[in-house]
Amino acid sequence: MTTGTHGISMRSKPFLMVTVGALALGACSTMPQREATAPTLPAAWTDVETARNEAALTDWWKGFNDPALDALVNDGLASGPSVRLAALRIKEARALSRQTLGQFLPEVSGRAGGQYTRVIDGPQLTGSFQSFVAGGGAGTVVRESEQFIGSYGPQLAWEIPLFGRIEASAIGSTANTRVALEDLRGVRAALAGDVAQAYVDYRAGQQRVAALQEAVELSRRLADIVEISAEAGFAAPADAADARRLAESTRARLPDVVLSARQAAARLAVLRGRAPGTEPESVLTALHADTPVPSYALSAAPAAPADLLRLRPDIAQAQARTLVAAAALGIARADLLPQVRLTGSIDVTDNIIGSGVPERLIQGQLGPGISIPLLDWGRRWSATKVRDAQFEQALVTYQSTVTNAVSEASLALASLAQGQERLDAARKAEASAEATARGVRASHEAGIANLADRLRAEQQLIDARVTRIGAEQSQASAAIQVYRAFGGGPPPLSRKEERALGTSALRGRQAGE
């Protein structure tokens, strides 16, 4: 064998040149140069000022100062099914990433086999080299009736990642994992908002039920008084019928309010991964307590419009999906170019019984192969056009996601501002109704006003209270929507916490906590 000055086989130099050239080509990138760019954003909000309190976005629900709500949100974040599913999607994305990048590594496998031959009828087989040497003489040829040859050894196959295939795959895998991570962040933020909204709806329903039950009793008493007066000739029968209509109309409003409160309680259970009716005693005690609708003193935007690009999980997801589409386009472009495959093996052949080969024969093979798309080049070119269109769609979707996010935040802030005005008016109306009711009570106790006048004043006070409860619910919902629009939610989880979501929480729930 002829060797060069550095001990490299002259016969292997062409192969090394091909390999080095292939690796150099592998550095070429087929990724598109365009990136996701955000549209022009407003410099400030029009409805409220910006207070820049991004720290409050992390655990914004604590601003309600309601321990029961805090416990429900924490329980949902720890064991909610939507959160556990999102954590499992991260696990899946990471496994797919390892699988994608693993396909660019050399494939090494082992092979073993044997061949046994025996003469059943006819001349015997030529003997083995060992039998010839040991059989007695240079002119002696030993014949065997059976032979057994065994062979084994490793095999290598490697498709060299040329033209940026590994770069595109790595970018796509990383971006796909980021999509899953942002999905978990978005799900956790949405769950906190959903639990808070269900809790606000439950408390509002609870307060409405109490107010309407009192209104039903007052309207019934008023109808009874007017009917008695009509029978005695002191009131018209039409007034008695109208009073009874009012009483029945008030009572007809009660079932819907009761059902609304129960639906909110059921949502609270389902969001936290529980079946309605299986709440722990501690949760039931907290929910049954007579607690007013939680309020949130929020009067400013927690961040500027441009901050939404990094605060909103859906925007980060849309940006990551543009990278996934760009990586798919890069791979499709690389498929238009030649592919080089390196194959090799080491074969060890053993003479076990009477073979015509030496006792052991070791052979090594190594060589490249090149594949160039010819007849299917049109199909591959069409695939690049498909991927390019999908990449363009991802870019447009990103911009659309940004504009929708700004619109949602702007509308949420407008609703917050209008809701505060509505709540102020409702509180003033309730205060006026309460002042009127106090005056009528005093007049009734002094014998100036009759009982019917007092009951009517009490009814108006209850109606004003129900209106105020609705305004408080709307204002709390507006505050929740603002934080949702700004991507407010708990901080990202560690990998250990992600794994725990799919296992420990479920086992604890099955154990009957």
Image (tube, grey):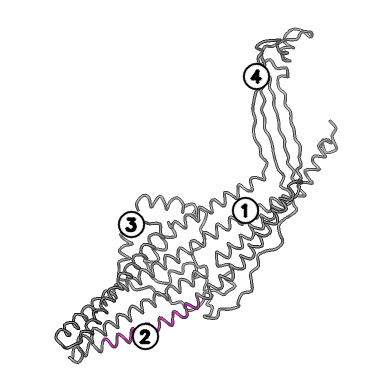
Classed neighbour count for the residue bearing mark 2: other residues with Cα under 10 Å, few (<14), some (14–19), many (≥20): some
Q: Tags 4 and 1 in contact by the CB under 8 Å rule? A: no
Where residue 181 appears, x then y in whole percent?
55, 58
Q: Which amino acid is tagged 4?
A: Tyr
> Number of labelled discs?
4
Residue placed under numbered mark 3 in the picture: 278
Q: Quadrant of residue 439 in the image?
A: bottom left
Along the viewing direction, whichever of 78 and 37 lies nearer the viewer? 37
Along the viewing direction, whichever of 245 and 176 lies nearer the viewer? 245
Of pointers 2 and 4, the one earlier in the residue sequence: 4
Residue placed under numbered mark 1 in the picture: 173
Residue placed under numbered mark 2 in the picture: 428
Q: Which amino acid is tagged 2?
A: Lys
Q: Quadrant of residue 309 in the image?
A: bottom right
Q: Residue furthest left?
A: 232
Q: Tags 3 and 4 in contact by the CB under 8 Å rule? A: no
Along the viewing direction, whichever of 428 and 51 lies nearer the viewer? 428
Classed neighbour count for the residue bearing mark 4: other residues with Cα under 10 Å, few (<14), some (14–19), many (≥20): few
Q: Tags 2 and 3 in contact by the CB under 8 Å rule? A: no
Of pointers 3 and 1, the one earlier in the residue sequence: 1
Residue drawn at 39 percent across, 51 percent down? 508
Residue drawn at 64 percent across, 26 percent down? 113
Residue drawn at 52 percent across, 77 percent down? 51
Q: Secondary structure at mark 1?
A: helix
Check residue 116 in the rendering and tell me which mark sits there, or answer none: 4
| Alpha carbons under labels 3 and 1: distance apart | 41 Å
Of pointers 3 and 4, the one earlier in the residue sequence: 4
